[in-house]
């Protein structure tokens, strides 16, 4: 019984009540993953499980058994930041910085999802591949709340990285 | 959270046996159940994790789809066959919650999610007949904007919050169940109970039964279909009203129609009366208004949600006009 | 809020009237206004890399040896008392270390409420904390459990059995009007203010509007939950808090627990959003008390539900605005009165009538606010308290009057633009609202607006434009101090207890210090977020930047003097005084004769000093009393309203600001937009659902209290006049709160223009437009 977190094997906690978010924050001190509501309503706790974005506050750690978890700390590689991390700074896609790791993790998975053909509620034609318009980004990122109001910068940062990915 | 133990059975037979035990609850993605446990609404002694059971999406002979109970909501929405043949189902799923939650939530978990009634979710201070039978209902005279205008009872006006299930209702989905007595298939239309005087009983599932799959029959209505959700925030909010509609047209008249509503009833609401009124007739605003008047004749709105009657009529008409309009 | 306060403030203003301007702070403009280097540049947040990397440690993320976890139990009733309390099951539960209730909570005094006459105070509630069996509001903390893990603590808290005896609670807004109180003052203004006979003018004038506007309660909903990590070491206390008022919290905790101020250290280097909500509430106090009893470090993170229960929000308001005008569009009456909830134990008067006192010329005025006493969690300051909701009423009314008169709403505003403060006659320090409107209207394309409502559409979507003025008073808080340590290597360590909830405090003050000290930004270290550093006031009232700037300026002046003293008689600078030199390019330079100069390094080297340290306090903020000073904005908005469903979408928004000099365009833009986006929530979606039957908040979740999601937020355009304020440090006025003001009215006015429907009660939900 173990979870692979940012490449490291971590034992499942004995108490099944422990959420993945609390395992990360309280036991592993990976506090880049934030808790904003513990109700599944804000997205601050977003991490990637097997590459897909999920809410770590509503995931029991035991449910992640045998799976690969990537947190904000694992998103950058070998000390060089993920392009989204740099773009968020450039476009001022945050103020207090608390929802930021969740936004960035969500955006990373979202871009992969778009590349894989995942549609959204605002995709006009579900039979076609979605083109990543600002509206598409907004809908796909709506599960990550931001109270400081950095929405414009977040969307700009994501679109810039999406453009560079294509180029 | 009350302490509990965690089991992950290898088969639906094992899961069914565990589910029959007192205090045992089935766990899917946990997006609703874990939250309810934290709030003190649910106190299972054992969680039976069924996410490892079937999550396959298979095309059946003669058309139609069989979706494994543990299929993730996002996997269903993104599936090429769903998008091609049942776009309203894709759209409905994508209208619900957030990408993160759709990645976690299973199809069976979505079907079995509980109401978001504020009083149901407040065991510390509020009365709720669904949570505690016989305790009373604080929603009747309280905040009931998100509550039912159809199908409620004097004891409960909570709504079923799903978007996916509204589309499934319109698509005549069937629920595959497994229990100690074997397997059976129940039409979704017969799966949910109305609250009556026992709002705590929400489905017709027997103790020890679990959902193994959802079957969607082939339907011409699936393709010419739409799902429109109206809510208080542009995204990531529950429906005030939602409309799932599919039509087939013949020479400018409505040959056949499927119509279901969300956000307005204790279960996803199949609008059989409106369908009957519109079937075989012209796709005119007048016909639609008359059909909706018939459907909503028995509506019993509360103080905070009376607007939904008009909102639902308008939204339905707009969706149908769009679907039945000239598509050349 | 006393009559005495009115007398004191009036006398100070009178005396100041006789003082020559040049003797006052800002009497000669801050030289940096004309000499900007780092200030005014687009600088990315310097704490950006650690925030995007997840390395910034917030209050709940400080690791401590032997730490335990706290969980709170809240009262489910609103008024009454605990008749019977049984903690035995909780105490016996696995992992439990302590169950604390009024029985074993230390006896503590009440924390003094924050107020304009006691600016060092930080209390948001003047109610006793866990001192007795009485329940005073729904959600009050009745017990705290400490356990080895959070899961154990939460579960044990649920095992505490309390038998409540309920008493009648005051929970009805309407019913409470019968016993409303009318305070003598609202902040530093006299409350009941009358000029001329406004009711008479209203009745006599050819054009008038007279309506009631309602705004609901709101909650701050910073995404970071309120949290503390607390540790005692003997008689010293360390509190890692999420705080907008670090020094004041340390002082309050010291007083409360009988310690010297030096024995308490509050640290808060990062705060995950504040908006007025991250003050001193009950949770810090019970966590500190529990840590003392248990003898172990304690972490207490409020649940989201818990934040709603014990941290107050913005009060609901019911406001009457009546306006009248003569045939030429000159205002003849401006009446703004109303009711809001403010129990005697809370600090915030929600000053919604203040805007109208300073914005328009009118022949007559009448203002008064009444306070209702309900049994609620104490209401508090939330981003632009008063102005955010007050401008909704006032600026909707202006739009209504313009429509009534058939003139453009911008034109009506410009016709009533005052020359001096309309009530006091005090001169404005700087005011370019007209320019903000002209330039904003041009860029937004206001000329394309159709005056007749309901005439623009795109399919089912009706399109409309609206505008509204925003206003927020300038404030600089007294009592800010800072220290500077200048090293021979040419580095400066600037320190003060400042707080940063996302405004970019450290980034902007490093820009400032670089210019002030004549050093490159890379040479500045800014230490903040720690009560052990020189005291600065709370981050509130959009005042922190100039408050700290004044302190750093004073310290820099002192540093100049010290350097001159060290330079001695053999220096080219010999004989010069602090006011006669500037710090430029790592040198002291004579203002008169720039050839007289010597580098910091030379001075320190000759004096055989490795470094030099000074600390100083900023001047008293007398400019606030001598001049009328306001940040202003012209808000423009385009909405789309579905004719089918009534759904409203903001499709375009532009804020044209007049807030003095802009110190960092990048972070300022974000702050403006952040305020405007909170304004979208205020206008369209946000409402704290207070069940008047029970006195309980029923949407204490981020799922049910709708702050704007990404899809609710369009691309927002922001511009500014940038005209420096000659009376303020750096020429800047506050920008933290102005963004939200006027936005709700601009949106409501746009909705009217789109649909012909005037919604006067927020939020503008779709049912109001069906």
Image (spheres, coloured by chain):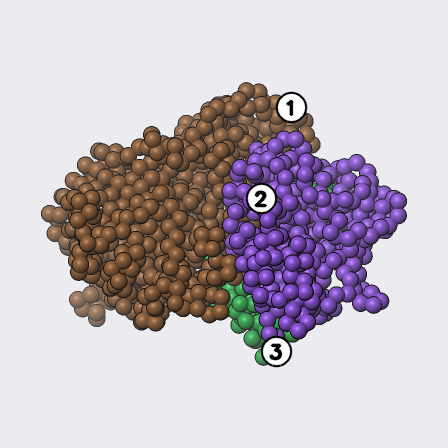
Quadrant position of the N terminus of chain C in the picture = top left
Residue at 31% across / 48% down in the picture? Answer: C211
Would you say the residues marked 2 and 1 are in contact, meaning their CB atoms lie under 8 Å apart? no
Residue at figure coordinates x 59%, y 28% from the top left: C99
Q: Are marks 1 and 3 in contact (CB under 8 Å)?
A: no
| Chain coloured green | A
Asked whether, in this view, residue C586 is left or right of residue B179, the answer is left
Q: Provide the secondary structure element on which disc 3 rests.
A: loop
Residue B175 percent across, percent down from the top left: 78, 53
Q: Which one is in front, C738 or C120? A: C738
From the image, tell me which residue sits under label 3: B328
Colour seen for chain B: purple
Viewed as shown, does residue B242 lie left or right of C335?
right
Q: Is residue C749 visible?
A: yes
Chain letter, disc 3 residue? B
| Chain hosting mark 1 | C
Q: Chain of mark 2?
A: B
Question: Mark 2 highlights which residue?
Answer: B300
Residue under circle 1?
Answer: C88
Of badges 1 and 3, nearer the viewer stands: 3
Q: Which chain appears brown?
A: C
Quarter of the image where one finds residue B165: bottom right
Q: Image height check: is B141 above or below B145? A: above
Rendered location of residue C749, percent (x, y): 36, 58
Where B158 falls versus A83 (above or below)?
above
**Residue C512 image offset from top left, x and y in percent:** 34, 60
Horizontal and vertical percent position of residue B325? 59, 71
């Amino acid at each position: 019984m173990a979870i692979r977190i940012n490449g490291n094997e971590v034992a499942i906690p004995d108490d099944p009540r422990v959420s993945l978010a609390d395992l990360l924050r309280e036991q592993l001190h990976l506090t880049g993953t934030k808790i904003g509501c513990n109700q599944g309503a804000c997205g601050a706790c977003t991490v990637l499980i097997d590459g897909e974005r999920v809410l770590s506050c509503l995931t029991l750690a035991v449910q992640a058994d045998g799976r690969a978890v990537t947190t904000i700390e694992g998103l950058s590689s070998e000390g060089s930041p993920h392009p989204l991390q740099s773009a968020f700074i450039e476009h001022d896609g945050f103020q207090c910085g608390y929802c930021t790791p969740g936004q960035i993790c969500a955006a990373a998975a979202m871009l992969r999802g778009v590349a894989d053909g995942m549609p959204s509620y605002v995709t006009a034609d579900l039979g076609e591949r979605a083109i990543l318009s600002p509206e598409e980004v907004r809908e796909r990122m709506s599960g990550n709340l931001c109270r400081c109001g950095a929405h414009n910068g977040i969307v700009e940062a994501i679109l810039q990285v999406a453009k560079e990915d294509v180029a | 959270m009350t302490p509990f133990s965690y089991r992950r059975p290898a088969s639906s037979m094992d899961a069914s046996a565990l589910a029959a035990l007192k205090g045992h609850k089935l766990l899917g993605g946990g997006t609703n159940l874990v939250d309810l446990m934290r709030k003190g609404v649910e106190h299972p002694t054992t969680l039976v994790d069924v996410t490892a059971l079937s999550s396959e999406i298979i095309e059946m002979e003669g058309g139609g789809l069989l979706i494994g109970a543990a299929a993730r909501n996002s996997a269903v929405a993104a599936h090429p066959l769903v998008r091609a043949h049942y776009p309203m189902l894709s759209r409905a799923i994508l209208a619900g919650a957030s990408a993160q939650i759709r990645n976690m939530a299973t199809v069976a978990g979505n079907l079995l999610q509980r109401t978001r009634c504020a009083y149901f979710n407040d065991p510390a201070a509020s009365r709720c007949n669904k949570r505690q039978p016989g305790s009373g209902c604080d929603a009747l005279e309280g905040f009931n904007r998100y509550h039912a205008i159809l199908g409620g009872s004097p004891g409960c006006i909570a709504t079923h919050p799903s978007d996916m299930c509204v589309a499934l209702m319109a698509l005549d989905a069937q629920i595959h169940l497994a229990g100690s007595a074997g397997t059976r298939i129940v039409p979704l239309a017969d799966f949910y109970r109305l609250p009556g005087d026992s709002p705590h009983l929400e489905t017709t599932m027997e103790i020890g039964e679990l959902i193994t799959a959802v079957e969607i029959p082939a339907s011409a209505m699936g393709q010419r279909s739409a799902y429109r959700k109206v809510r208080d925030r542009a995204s990531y909010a529950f429906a005030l009203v939602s409309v799932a509609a599919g039509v087939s047209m013949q020479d400018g008249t409505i040959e056949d129609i499927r119509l279901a509503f969300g956000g307005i009833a204790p279960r996803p609401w199949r609008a059989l009366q409106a369908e009957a009124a519109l079937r075989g007739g012209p796709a005119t605003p007048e016909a639609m208004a008359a059909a909706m008047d018939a459907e909503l004749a028995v509506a019993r709105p509360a103080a905070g949600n009376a607007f939904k009657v008009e909102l639902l009529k308008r939204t339905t008409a707009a969706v149908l006009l769009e679907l039945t309009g000239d598509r050349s | 809020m006393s009559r005495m306060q009115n007398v004191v403030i009036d006398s100070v203003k009178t005396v100041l009237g006789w003082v020559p301007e040049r003797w006052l702070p800002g009497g000669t403009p801050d030289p940096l206004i004309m000499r900007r280097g780092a200030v005014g540049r687009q600088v990315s947040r310097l704490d950006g890399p650690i925030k995007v990397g997840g390395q910034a440690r917030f209050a709940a993320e400080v690791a401590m040896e032997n730490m335990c976890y706290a969980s709170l139990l809240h009262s489910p009733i609103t008024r009454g008392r605990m008749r019977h309390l049984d903690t035995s099951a909780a105490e016996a539960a696995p992992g439990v270390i302590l169950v604390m209730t009024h029985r074993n909570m230390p006896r503590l005094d009440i924390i003094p409420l924050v107020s304009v006459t006691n600016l060092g105070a930080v209390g948001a509630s003047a109610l006793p904390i866990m001192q007795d069996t009485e329940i005073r509001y729904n959600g009050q903390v009745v017990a705290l459990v400490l356990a080895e893990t959070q899961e154990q603590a939460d579960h044990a808290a649920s095992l505490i059995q309390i038998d409540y005896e309920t008493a009648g609670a005051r929970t009805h807004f309407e019913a409470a009007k019968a016993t409303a109180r009318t305070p003598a003052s609202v902040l530093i203004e006299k409350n009941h203010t009358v000029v001329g006979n406004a009711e008479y003018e209203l009745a006599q004038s050819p054009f008038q509007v007279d309506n009631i506007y309602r705004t609901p309660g709101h909650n701050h909903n910073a995404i970071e939950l309120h949290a503390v990590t607390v540790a005692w070491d003997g008689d010293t206390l360390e509190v890692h808090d999420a705080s907008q008022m670090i020094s004041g919290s340390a002082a309050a905790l010291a007083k409360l627990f009988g310690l010297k101020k030096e024995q308490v250290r509050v640290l808060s280097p990062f705060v995950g959003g504040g908006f007025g909500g991250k003050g001193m509430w009950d949770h810090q106090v019970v966590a500190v008390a529990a840590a003392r009893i248990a003898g172990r470090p304690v972490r207490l993170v409020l649940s989201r539900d818990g934040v709603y229960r014990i941290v107050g929000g913005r009060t609901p308001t019911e406001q009457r605005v009546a306006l009248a005008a003569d045939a030429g569009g000159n205002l003849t009456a401006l009446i703004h009165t109303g009711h809001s909830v403010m129990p005697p134990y809370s600090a915030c008067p929600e000053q919604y009538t203040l805007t109208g006192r300073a914005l328009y010329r009118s022949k007559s005025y009448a203002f008064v606010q009444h306070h209702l006493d309900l049994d609620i969690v104490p209401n508090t300051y939330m981003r632009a308290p008063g102005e955010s909701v007050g401008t909704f009423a006032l600026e909707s009314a202006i739009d209504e009057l313009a429509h009534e008169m058939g003139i453009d709403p911008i034109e009506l505003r410009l016709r009533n633009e005052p020359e001096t403060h309309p009530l006091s006659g005090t001169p404005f320090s700087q005011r370019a609202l007209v320019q903000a409107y002209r330039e904003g209207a041009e860029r937004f394309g206001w000329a394309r607006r159709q005056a007749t409502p309901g005439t623009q559409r795109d399919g089912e979507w009706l399109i409309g434009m609206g505008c509204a003025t925003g206003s927020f008073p300038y404030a600089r808080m007294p009592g800010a101090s800072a220290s500077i340590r200048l090293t021979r290597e040419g580095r400066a360590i600037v320190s003060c207890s400042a707080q940063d909830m996302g405004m970019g405090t450290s980034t902007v003050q490093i820009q400032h210090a670089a210019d002030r000290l004549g050093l490159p930004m890379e040479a500045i270290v800014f230490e903040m977020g720690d009560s052990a550093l020189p005291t600065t006031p709370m981050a509130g009232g959009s005042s922190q930047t100039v408050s700290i700037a004044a302190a750093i300026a004073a310290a820099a002046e002192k540093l100049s003097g010290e350097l001159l003293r060290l330079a001695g008689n053999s220096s080219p600078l010999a004989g010069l005084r602090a006011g006669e030199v500037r710090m430029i390019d790592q040198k002291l330079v004579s203002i008169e004769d720039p050839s007289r100069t010597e580098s910091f390094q030379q001075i320190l080297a000759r004096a055989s000093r490795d470094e030099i340290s000074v600390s100083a306090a900023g001047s008293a903020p007398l400019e606030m009393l001598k001049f009328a000073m306001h940040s202003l904005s012209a808000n423009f908005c385009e909405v789309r309203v579905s004719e089918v469903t009534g759904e409203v979408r903001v499709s375009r928004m532009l804020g044209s600001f007049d807030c003095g000099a802009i110190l960092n365009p990048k972070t300022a833009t974000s702050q403006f937009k952040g305020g405007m986006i909170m304004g979208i929530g205020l206008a369209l979606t946000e409402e704290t659902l207070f069940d008047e039957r029970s006195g309980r908040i029923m949407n204490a979740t981020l799922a049910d209290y709708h702050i704007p999601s990404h899809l609710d937020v369009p691309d927002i355009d922001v511009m500014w006049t940038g005209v420096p304020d000659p009376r303020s440090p750096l020429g800047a006025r506050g920008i933290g709160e102005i963004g939200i003001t006027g936005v709700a009215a601009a949106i409501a006015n746009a909705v009217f223009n789109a649909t012909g429907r005037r919604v006067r009660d927020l939020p503008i939900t779709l049912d109001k437009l069906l």
